[in-house]
Amino acid sequence: MVVSAAMAALALILPIAFHAVGLGSQFLPMLLPLLLNGFLVPLPWALLTGATVPIISSFMTGMPPTHRFGFLYDLPGARPSPTAETGYLGKCLSLSSKFLGC
């Protein structure tokens, strides 16, 4: 749980630092701590951390930008694509690290 919290905090701070020096779009810095998190923590924590970090980041910084859902309103933080992507990434890496015995 502590490792997941530290990786989530790093996944929120690292993109800001990378975008400040102009490297944000080349390295996708939010994914780097989530990749490491998938290898270090059990499956439920990897999946939960990977799925919640893009939503929290969107609320806090506006990155990743929100999509328009429906015609009447915007749902800030409701990005199904990055949320599903990073959650699935954490799940796959956690399962592969168990399979490989890491």
Image (cartoon, rainbow, N blue to C red):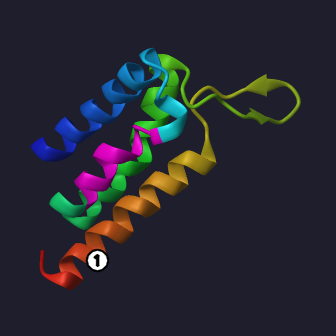
Eyeballing the image, is 1 above or below 60?
Answer: below
Q: Quadrant of residue 21?
A: top left
Check the image and name the residue furthest to the top.
20
Q: Nearer the viewer, residue 89 or 47?
A: 89
Q: Residue visible at 27% across and 61% down?
A: 44
- Amino acid type, callout 1: Ser
Eyeballing the image, is 55 above or below 1?
Answer: above
Q: Residue visible at 37% across and 70% down?
A: 92
Q: Which residue is mark 1?
A: 96
Tell me: 7 left or right of 55: left
Eyeballing the image, is 77 above or below 89?
Answer: above
- Quarter of the picture containing the C terminus is bottom left
Tell me: 62 left or right of 19: right
Q: Few, some or many C-alpha atoms within 10 Å of disc 1 (few <14, some 14-19, many ≥20)?
A: some
Check the image and name the residue furthest to the right.
71
Q: Is residue 1 visible?
A: no
Tell me: 98 left or right of 76: left
Q: Quadrant of residue 73?
A: top right
Q: Is residue 45 visible?
A: yes
Q: How many marks?
A: 1
Q: Main secondary structure of the magenta part?
A: helix
Q: Residue visible at 26% across and 66% down?
A: 43
Q: Quadrant of residue 89?
A: bottom left
Check the image and name the residue furthest to the bottom.
99
Q: Position of residue 37 (x, y in %)?
A: 24, 52
Q: Please check the rendered image and state whether residue 34 is part of the magenta-colored stretch, yes or no.
A: yes
Q: Position of residue 75 (x, y in %)?
A: 67, 29
Q: Position of residue 22 (x, y in %)?
A: 49, 21
The magenta stretch spans which residues? 27-38
